[in-house]
Image: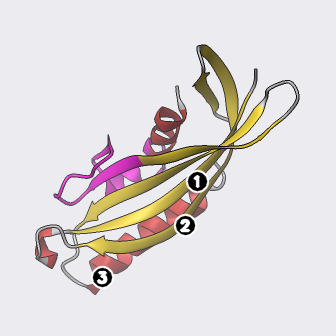
Amino acid sequence: MNIIETVRSILESFPKISQVCNSIHIDFADPEPTSYGLSSTGDELLREDVLGNQLRQHSFMLYTTYSSINDYERLNNSTALAELSVWLHDQTGAEVETVIGAETCTGTLEKLSAYNGMLINVPQGDLYDGVQYQLQIIAEYTVRR
């Protein structure tokens, strides 16, 4: 699995995912509550050794749509993102495949960090139809050549 598939799979294994989400889409979240969208925002080479092994960083935005009728629901939404952020920090060691040039290389997920979980949008213009949050996720992984 590439880094996008790996992070999506990890998110789907979050123990409370069924309480807050029906599905994790790539690049967008449905406007209906209980939808997640994982959007890849870039990949960067952090360092490379003399053998060509690399440490890379991939950035994501996780968009979520939650019901938000009252403060109780909005508190639950923020709590779910906070718990997900803490849980992600412990998810390391997954195998990752990366194509460099024409070569498929394997590596390991070294670190997942999550930041800036916040309300960003009221897609339908009405709190009763759901609100959208975002969470920034950074994945550091190695590539062996």
110 sits left or right of 34 in the view: right
**Span colored in magenta:** 12-39
Q: Position of residue 67 (x, y in %)?
A: 22, 69
Disc nearer the start of the sequence (1/2): 2
* Residue at (49% x, 61% y) in the render: 136
* Residue at (41% x, 55% y) in the render: 62
19 sits left or right of 108 in the view: left
Answer yes or no: do the residues labelled 1 and 2 have beta carbons within 8 Å?
yes
Residue 138 numbered tag? 1
Q: Position of residue 8 (x, y in %)?
A: 45, 40
Q: Amino acid at mark 1?
A: Ile
Q: Position of residue 77 (x, y in %)?
A: 36, 71
Disc nearer the start of the sequence (3/2): 3
Q: Position of residue 71 (x, y in %)?
A: 28, 85
> Is residue 85 positioned above or below 57 on the image?
below
Residue 115 numbered tag? 2
